[in-house]
Each structure stands twice: as structure tokens, then as C-alpha cells.
């Protein structure tokens, strides 16, 4: 008998494992996210006990973030190979090894910030019947156009209660990349140009169109610099490709679906999705190979 069979797995366990398949999460983040579960965890102590049981069954592992938090570094959780197989079957093709390994210390801040964005987007949407689906993990979605190759930090679709759907890709900016560069190297400018070229393949009504959400974790000035540059590089300034927000501002907004907390390249304030509209069939996901659109795609 394998370890996982020694622990009875219920619906809430599957929801926990599914959440960890999207992104490494701390116990605190999981408790917040559980608001969207069929049976939320009212107390963090109950969640901790369940996580210990899943860990003892070799379904998850945890490591410590290299970030101080009131004198303590929080632990983040990831699936093991057994946990992944429990979700998708024993014959599933496993992701590469790094999916199951500890995050490199230099990537801790970025991963934790991305998780905060994901949790806040899901729970604030859940409160009003908005579903996040078709999630693509970091570096699993490949977008190509005119020599540009892009791997977003995340991609997903939001489905509203009235049947409208909206595609997003996310870029979390920790202030470590150059904003502009004349050389053909990694920079925010190169990302902006690449996304603009990729979006140029779609007309205004194409259901595969998406919004690029830039979330900055440093200063508001850097966000404005990125949006100003986005306005400069866009081939069609009338088209909305990019929106941005500072992480602290986003997390402090109780309802980004109703409060205009985002800013586009024209300086206009926007909600995460339009406030109203006629019901429409769900949109397609991004136009790329089917394998890369699966949220558990191998990279």
C-alpha cells in the first residue's frame, strides 16, 4: 500500500492539491484561497493539520521562504510526484524535475508575489460568481511572434456570472529587469514589443485576444515608466493590450472587479473586467499549441 492510500482523500484535499498545482502557496495563502472551496477552512489550525497529513502521505512537500515575516519565514508547499499522479492519474506525463523541487532563493520574492496575485484574483472573483479557469503555470505557455518568444508568469481566463470571458497573461515585475535596452537582451521593453506583435495577429473581436497585466512590486514610479513605454511601443495606440497595478494597491483593493484599480497605457483607470456587457459564449483560450495550454504542461 502506498502512503497516499493510508490517508483518506476527500474533495477538499483535491482542492488543496489542485491549488498547489497552479502555484506554490504558503499556509496563509491556502487558508485565504479556501474561501473558494466547497468547504472553506475556518481556522488555520485545521488547515495545518490537514497539510501535515498530506505531507505524511507523501503528496506534498514544503520548504521555508528566505523572507522574514514577523521574525519567521513562512513555508511554501508544492506537490510531490505522488500528489501529481493522484490528481491526473498514474500514467500522466510528469513535469520536469524543477516542478517538484525547492524554489531557488533568488526567485522566492517573485513566486510569493505571484501567488498573492493569484489568490486575491480568485477569492475576490469567487465572491461575485467569477471563475478563474484555464490556468497556465509560470513558463508553461509559449507565445511567439516575429522572432519574439514570450513565457508569461501566468495565464488564465476569467468567466463572469453572465457568461462573458476574458483572457489574461500576467507579468510580475520585481524591478530586477531593465525597463529599456538598445541591445537584444531581456528587458521590459522587449516583452512589451513581443506582446504587441503577438496581439497584432488578432482583430478586435477575436476571442483569443488577451490583456497583459503588469504587477509591479516596487515603486509606483516604475509602473508608470512601464506604462509610458507601453504607449510608445504599441503599433495601435487605440488598442488596449497592457494594464498595470502596484502589488500593494492590488492586494489592498477589496474588489478589483468593481473598483477601477488598474491603469492602462493611456492613463485611464479600469476594473479587472468590464462592469457590464451582454452575455456571450465563453472565449477561446490563447491561440497556441494545445499542449502548452494545459495548466500542467511540461517545460
Image: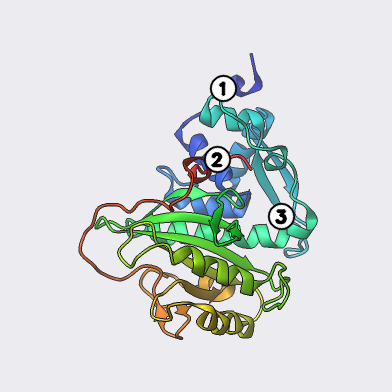
- Which of pointers 3 and 1 indicates the residue nearer the eye? 1
Q: Earlier in the sequence, mark 2 or mark 1?
A: 1
Question: Which comes sooner in the sequence, label 3 or label 2?
Answer: 3
User: Could you say which disc has been placed on residue 286 in the image?
Assistant: none
Picture quarter containing residue 95?
Answer: top right
6 lies above or below 144: above
Q: Nearer the viewer, residue 185 or 279?
A: 185
**Residue 156, image x and y in percent?**
46, 54
Label 1: state its secondary structure.
Answer: loop
Q: Residue reaching furthest left?
A: 278
Residue 158: x and y, percent? 39, 57
Q: Is residue 203 above or below residue 13?
A: below
**Residue in view at x 38 percent, y 68 percent:** 257
Q: Is residue 63 left or right of residue 81?
A: right
Mark 3 in CB contact with mark 1 (< 8 angstroms):
no
| Colour theme | rainbow
Res 72 seen here: no
Task: Please state if 115 lies on the left or on the right of 159 as rendered.
Answer: right
Mark 1 highlights which residue? 91
Badge 2: residue crowd in 10 Å (few <14, some 14–19, many ≥20) = many
| Tally of numbered tags | 3
The residue that label 2 is drawn on is 296
Q: Which label number is shown at residue 74? A: 3
* Horizontal and vertical percent position of residue 261: 45, 77
Is the C terminus in the top left, top right, bottom left or bottom right quadrant?
Answer: top right
Q: Is residue 273 left or right of residue 172?
A: left
Lower sequence index among marks 3 and 1 = 3
| Residues tagged 3 and 2 counted as in contact (Cβ below 8 A) | no
Q: Nearer the viewer, residue 225 or 185?
A: 185
Residue furthest toward the top?
A: 1
Q: Secondary structure at mark 3?
A: loop
Q: Nearer the viewer, mark 3 or mark 2?
A: 2
Amino acid at each position: 500500500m502506498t502512503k497516499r492510500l493510508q490517508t483518506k482523500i476527500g474533495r477538499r484535499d483535491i482542492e488543496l492539491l489542485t491549488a498547489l498545482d497552479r502555484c506554490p502557496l504558503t499556509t496563509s495563502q491556502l487558508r485565504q484561497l479556501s474561501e473558494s472551496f466547497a468547504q472553506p477552512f475556518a481556522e488555520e489550525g485545521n488547515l495545518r493539520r490537514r497539510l501535515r497529513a498530506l505531507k505524511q502521505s507523501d503528496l506534498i512537500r514544503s520548504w521555508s521562504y528566505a523572507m522574514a515575516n514577523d521574525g519567521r519565514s513562512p513555508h511554501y508547499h508544492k506537490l510531490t510526484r505522488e500528489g501529481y499522479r493522484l490528481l491526473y492519474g498514474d500514467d500522466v506525463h510528469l513535469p520536469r524535475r524543477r516542478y517538484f523541487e525547492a524554489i531557488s532563493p533568488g526567485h522566492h520574492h517573485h513566486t510569493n508575489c505571484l501567488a498573492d496575485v493569484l489568490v486575491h484574483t480568485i477569492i475576490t472573483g469567487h465572491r461575485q460568481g467569477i471563475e478563474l479557469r484555464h490556468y497556465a503555470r509560470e513558463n508553461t505557455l509559449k507565445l511567439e511572434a516575429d522572432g519574439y518568444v514570450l513565457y508569461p508568469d501566468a495565464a488564465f481566463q476569467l468567466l463572469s456570472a453572465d457568461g462573458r470571458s476574458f483572457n489574461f497573461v500576467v507579468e510580475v515585475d520585481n524591478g530586477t529587469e531593465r525597463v529599456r535596452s538598445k541591445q537584444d537582451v531581456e528587458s521590459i521593453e522587449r516583452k512589451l514589443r513581443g506582446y504587441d506583435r503577438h496581439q497584432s495577429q488578432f482583430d478586435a473581436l477575436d476571442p483569443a485576444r488577451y490583456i497583459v497585466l503588469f504587477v509591479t512590486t516596487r515603486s509606483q514610479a516604475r509602473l508608470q515608466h512601464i506604462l509610458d513605454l507601453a504607449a510608445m511601443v504599441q503599433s495601435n495606440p487605440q488598442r488596449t493590450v497592457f494594464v498595470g497595478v502596484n502589488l500593494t494597491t492590488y492586494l489592498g483593493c477589496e474588489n478589483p472587479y468593481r473598483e477601477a484599480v488598474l491603469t492602462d497605457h493611456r492613463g485611464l483607470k479600469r476594473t479587472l473586467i468590464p462592469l457590464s456587457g451582454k452575455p456571450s459564449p465563453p472565449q477561446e483560450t490563447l491561440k497556441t499549441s494545445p499542449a502548452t495550454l494545459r495548466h500542467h504542461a511540461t517545460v
